[in-house]
Image: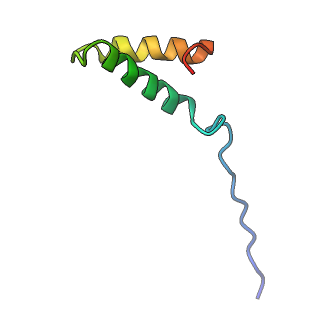
Amino acid sequence: MARKVTTVKQRTGKKAEGNSIEERIRMKAYELFEKNGKEHGRDMEHWLKAETLVKSGKGA
């Protein structure tokens, strides 16, 4: 009986230095949330600021 060979494509680029970019943004956004007195309703503001900081290398 012949064997069927299946190739599995691995995901690449998801993890960068231990944490994904999305995870680093999430952590930075939460940090901003805490620094701003845990005020609700500013989640988009915190996310966008965190995204800018992480992508510029200033949010490490």
In this view, which residue lies farthest toward the right? 2
Residue 34: x %, y % from top left: 31, 20
Q: Left or right of 46: which side holds 20?
A: right
Tell me the residue at 44%/11% (across/down). Answer: 49
Q: Left or right of 35: which side holds 37?
A: left
Residue 14: x %, y % from top left: 61, 38
In the picture, the quarter occupied by the C terminus is: top right
> On the image, which quarter does residue 55 sit in?
top right
Q: Left or right of 46: which side holds 50?
A: right
Tell me the residue at 52%/11% (across/down). Answer: 52
Numbered marks: total: 0
Query: Depth check: 53 or 8 in front?
Result: 53
Question: Looking at the picture, does residue 49 appear above or below residue 10?
Answer: above
> On the image, which quarter does residue 39 sit in?
top left
Describe the colour scheme in one phrase: rainbow
Tell me the residue at 62%/15% (across/down). Answer: 57
Residue 36: x %, y % from top left: 30, 12
